Amino acid sequence: MATTTKKSNSTKTSNTKSKTSAASAKKVPAKKNAAKELKDLFEDGLKDIYWAEKALTKALPKMQKNATDKKLKDAIGAHLAETKNQVKRLEDCFAAMGKKAQAKKCDAMQGLLDEGKGIMEETKPGAVRDAGIIAASQKVEHYEIATYGTLAAYAKVLKQNKCLRLLLKTLGEEKKCDELLTSIADTALNKKAMN
């Protein structure tokens, strides 16, 4: 009987905490220029990833220069070329919608790139830094995979068929890059970093 009362009291406490948290949570007011329709959200997402890809074209050469593993250096170099094509594809997507390509700072990508820079600063050159570069790169790839997947879903609903094709092509490249990075890490690089 005492056990039941104890459980009942802890449930009440838990429910009270949930209600307090819900009561203290506030609705976020929308900015003046907030997206009102899916097409606005789609355009904002394109501006965001356009900035992200352009920033990545500047960050990848630094990562390549700091990598020591040949396969990793080659993979970063190949992805730099792909990223430049991805920037062009985004410009084509804007053009298909009758819009000028426009970038809007992507806080998420900025954070990921800052983290990657920090990893390089906090590791000695060699296998450990290479493992860190792979980890940072895969975080970037996962962000891009999520973003391109979402934008492709929006393009499909909005019947932006040219954009959909372009976004799906890039999505496929990002997935392949992520798989390649995993295989490079798995083929002894992480083991080398242990020593």
Image (cartoon, grey):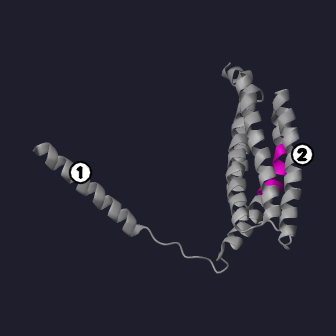
Q: Is residue 117 left or right of residue 36?
A: right
Instruction: Kindly report the distance in space between the C-alpha atoms of the residues bearing marks 2 and 1.
Output: 58 Å
Residue lying at 29% horizontally and 55% vertically, measured from the top left: 14
Circle 2 residue: 81
Q: Residue 182, relative to residue 139: is it above or below? A: above
Quarter of the image with the N terminus in it: top left
Q: Who is closer to the viewer here, 184 or 21?
A: 184
**Residue 180, located in which quarter of the rendered image?**
top right
Q: Residue 135, relative to residue 148: is it above or below? A: above
Quarter of the image with the C terminus in it: top right
Query: Residue 156 appears at what percent x and percent y?
Result: 72, 62
Q: Who is closer to the viewer here, 138 or 114?
A: 138
Q: Label 2: few (<14), some or many (≥20) within 10 Å?
A: few
Q: Residue 14, relative to residue 116: is it above or below? A: below
**Residue at the farthest left position:** 1
Query: Residue 185 appears at what percent x and percent y?
Result: 72, 28
Q: Who is closer to the viewer here, 56 or 42?
A: 42
SS under mark 2: helix
Residue lying at 83% horizontally and 29% vertically, measured from the top left: 71
Residue lying at 89% horizontally and 52% vertically, measured from the top left: 85
Residue 121 appears in view: no
Q: Which mark is residue 63?
A: none
Circle 1 residue: 10
Q: Which residue range is magenta in the image?
A: 52-60
Q: Main secondary structure of the magenta part?
A: helix
Residue 20 appears in view: yes
Query: Residue 114 appears at what percent x and percent y?
Result: 71, 49
SS under mark 1: helix
Residue lying at 38% horizontally and 63% vertically, measured from the top left: 21
The amino acid sitting under disc 2 is: Ala
